[in-house]
Image: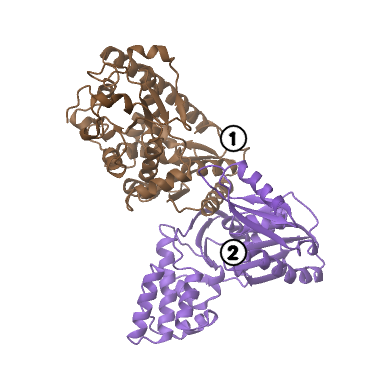
Amino acid sequence: MPVTGELRRSSADRVPPASSRGNIYERAPVSAGRINRLRPRKMVRWSAQLRGGVEPIDATVGIPRALLYHKYGDLWTAFFETLGVDTVVSPPTNRAILERGSRLAVDETCLPMKIFLGHVDSLMSQADYVLVPRVASLHRGETTCVKFLGAYDVARNSIPDARLIEYDVDVANGKRHATEIRRLGRGFERNPAKVGYAYMRARREANRLHSERALGNEQAALEPGLKVLVVGHPYNIYDEMIGAPVVSILREQGAAVLAAELADASRAKTLSARLSRDVPWTFNKELLGAVEHYREYVDGIVFLVTFPCGPDSLMTELCVRRLEGMPTLVLVLDELQGEAGLRTRLESFVDLLRLRRPKERTATTARVV
Amino acid sequence: MGFLGVDVGSISTKAAVIDDAGEVVARSYLWTEGDPLAAVKRVLAEVEPQAKAAGEDVVAVGVTGSARELIGAALEAQVVKNEITAHAMGTLSRHPGVHTIFEIGGQDSKIIIVRDGVPVDYAMNTLCAAGTGSFLSAQARRLNVPVEDFGDYALRSTKPTKIAGRCTVFAESDLVHKAQIGHPQEDLIAGLCQAIVMNYLNNVGKGKEVRAPIVFQGGVSKNVGVVKAFADITGEEIVVDDDGHLMGAIGVALLAREGEGRAEFEFSAHDVEFDTRGFECGGCPNDCEVVTLSRAGEFLDGWGNRCERGIERAKADISDA
């Protein structure tokens, strides 16, 4: 499949003939979800044209609030916004999305993937295209979990009517994120300089937001109160159905919550060697290093794992075994989880951390995550 | 002054009243039978005369166990605490030198590691109830032996049968198979006790340093067969407290004593009808299952909601009814 500046669709046979093109941009009225219309309409004039097309694209790109959204969401929204393309982000995961995703997915699929499919499905009526990148590797000599590689194809086959746009990232084979996302942008904007500018602006914006959060995390680590490090993928920690209850119960109990995910990635990667040198998965390697980075500062560590996650099950066991003397709590969540069991475990974990402290200092309220 | 602790578990409901010195002056232990509110009424009726006889007025109430939210609201408890902390507190008050607490209840099992009088680590069974009291009861029914007699049967065995205890379903088919090929009942029952202990040590106790003194508690600790299996497999002496099944109630009563809240507790005031209702909120796609507790049409408490809307609807729901 050629990759040059053409708007890639889910499959060639679903591209409507040029004569009917007027219709594909007519979309159902947008009723829910957050819509970014940050750029005034008249400024869209220079933007968004299909290669060979004559009309400006008045398309809306849907972004599922799942999986890589929690890593690249800021970048994506800022990128499309600068290109003058409307974006709509699916709402925080709710039960309807989870149930829809579970029905669409094969049984053995992991919980985040089911949630992801639910999000893609929920965008069908609101967006003309849904963005689903393929990520095979982000660094040389490392891989990502196969679900990031397969997300596009899984979505395409599970939801045949979905109109997906994608870009491939496979650094091991020379496909860098920066290059590939710009290639996707060329489908909306012919002028490469404008696409380049949009990427740069988006990168800057995403970096700024990330450093703010990371700084908050680092500062919270230095506060005196009871602190719990939550180790889990961003798509688990920040998910409304998975991580949000965990974080809110911990805070209710007066613990400050630190996210391992926010530790500086390159430093974390260096530190990860102290616990293990043989981790192939980029995200897990970063989390492993983050554990090493924060362990001195926190009272206990909660591992947030979704069922059935291969990399996490291995890494969690490894961490727990190597963190001698550190109280750890492993939470494995699936879609059947009731909140009662979760609450009992988290409450008693915080009680235990409090009893271990020589003298309880006043608990600070959590400031991060 | 007396302090009431109530532990409402999935299978049994326990209540204890302690005095200022922490001594138990009243105790009760009954089956929950799927109706925690009724069970609590019954334990209160049992505890009341004992507390009165000891001359203790209850001034604070603590509630623990899996129905703690419901019962905590109904009794207007000062302390509502999770069962792990409550159990650790209760056991430490009786056995200050303990290093390991084994606890097997009706539907959950846990291990609490204590060092220098402070709980430092714990683990709880995950999704599966294999190796808990309800598993034993189910197998007892299959063998047509009252679960109370299980221990005596197990002690009579000299060669316990090996039974796959990893999963209730497989254990059952394995048990049937072993019975069909002629293993005697005592050996089967002793084998079941060993299977429970192996399962417990391999799942709940995985990676934990089991160091003596060991206290074993929870409903299953009343089963001498399981106690013997624990002693055989760990090679340590296993301490079983006479009040072992009450540790949660004692612990939460102690927590109520340490707490600030004080309010005269009238036993008679709680002998009224409570009404619980469950409904699906439907206010948003989350469709939370909200449960509400009311007394004579008056809203007391509600839970299960992710946002305030659920409670608003619950209140409206009750005033409509």
Chain that is brown in the image: A
Q: How many marks?
A: 2
The kind of residue on which mark 1 rests is Thr
Is B197 rendered above or below residue A74?
A: below
Q: Position of residue B174 (x, y in %)?
A: 35, 76
Q: Position of residue A95 (x, y in %)?
A: 47, 46
- Would residue A258 appear left or right of A176 to someone viewing this image? right
Q: Quadrant of the N terminus of chain A?
A: top left
In the picture, residue B201 is in which quadrant? bottom left
Q: Nearer the viewer, residue A167 or B66?
A: A167
- Residue on which disc 1 sits: A365
Element marked by disc 2: loop
Residue occupying the point 41% across, 59% down: B206
Q: Is residue B186 visible?
A: yes
Q: Position of residue A128 (x, y in %)?
A: 35, 30
Residue occupying the point 34% across, 87% down: B182
Element marked by disc 1: loop
Residue A179 got which mark?
none
- Seen from this angle, which residue lies furthest front? A19
Q: Position of residue A114 (x, y in %)?
A: 37, 45
The kind of residue on which mark 2 rests is Gly
- Tell me the distance, in whole angstroms, between the alpha carbons under discs 2 and 1: 33 Å
- Residue on which disc 2 sits: B9
